[in-house]
Amino acid sequence: MNKTGKFGPYSATGHALALPGPGAQSGAELVRSRIALHVALATVRPGDRLPDVGVLAEQLGIGEMTVRRALEGMCQDGLLDRRRGRTGGTFVSADWSHVAAAHHDAEGAASIAGFLLLLECGLVAHASGEVDDEQLAGLRKLAEDLDATADPDRLREVETRFHLDLAEALGGRGMREVTADLLGRLCLLRPAAEPDTIRRQNLCHVDLLVHLTEGATDAAVRAVKEHM
Ligand SMILES: [Zn+2]
């Protein structure tokens, strides 16, 4: 869920589908990538029941039929389980990470990661020296949280949250949505980062925040590249 506790907001006529190349995403892919993102953010956990189709459709801003088909596809892939009866519904597979591994695609992941890198470099160059103090403070807090935790799931969750909040701090809500689309797809295409990798990346986060605060654009862009 996003800050308002929803899977959206999302508009089919908005930025996400308008992006070229690896940014382009169909409605069904959006459903997949958003569910994957929420699993990464631990706002939905393996074994949890998903909201009803109507609720998902409204939150994602796409048709119920598209959501229903996407969920069916994910059930066939084993990422979701459908259970009938009074306590039934659509559930995130308890075996999510194991099943998701069968869908990994290194080439696809590299393409999306490259796109995300360009986006972050552009956002940093665009906003350097003009980032809201409160948002910078929020990002520093996340970097401190990353430093303080040893739990691998929590590390991955906070690392994902950092990049969503960074995109919003640098480019506004629309850029947060674009980043959510890209990160959600990456979650399905590659294995989650190892704790040591995330800790190393957090050094880049800290550097980035220092340079952003100083308005040192070149150094800030370098920190983004080193993170990758
Ligand atoms: Zn990071």
Image: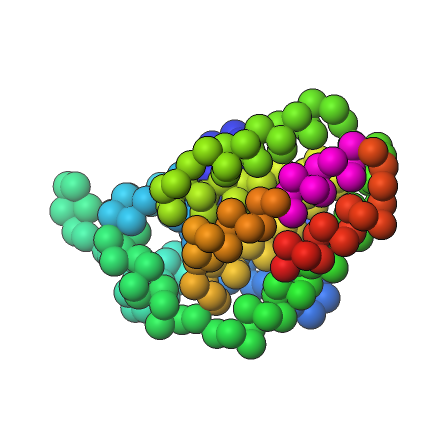
User: Which residue is situated farthest in the bottom direction here?
Assistant: 107
Q: Is residue 193 magenta?
A: no
| Vertical placement of residue 5 versus 111, above or below | above
In the figure, is residue 216 to the left or right of 52? right
Q: Residue 203, percent across and down?
A: 61, 45
Visible in this render: residue 100? yes
Residue at x 30%, y 65% (from the top left corner): 99
Instruction: Identify the main secondary structure in magenta.
Output: helix
In the figure, is residue 95 to the left or right of 13? left
User: Which residue is situated farthest in the top direction here?
Assistant: 134
Numbered label tally? 0
Q: Quick one: 112 or 59, which is closer to the camera?
A: 112
| Vertical placement of residue 92 versus 150, above or below | below
In the figure, is residue 34 to the left or right of 170? left
Residue at x 59%, y 70% (from the top left corner): 110
Q: Quadrant of residue 67?
A: bottom left
Colour style of the rendered protein structure: rainbow
Q: Residue 100, percent across and down?
A: 36, 64
Residue at x 17%, y 51% (from the top left corner): 84
Q: Residue 221, percent across and down?
A: 78, 51
Q: Is residue 208 magenta?
A: yes
Magenta residues (range): 204-213
Residue at x 50%, y 55% (from the top left corner): 197
Q: Quadrant of residue 101?
A: bottom left
Q: Quick one: 93 or 205, which is closer to the camera?
A: 205
Q: Quadrant of the C terminus?
A: bottom right
Visible in this render: residue 11? no
Q: Residue 55, percent across and down?
A: 42, 40
Q: Quick one: 200 or 106, which is closer to the camera?
A: 200
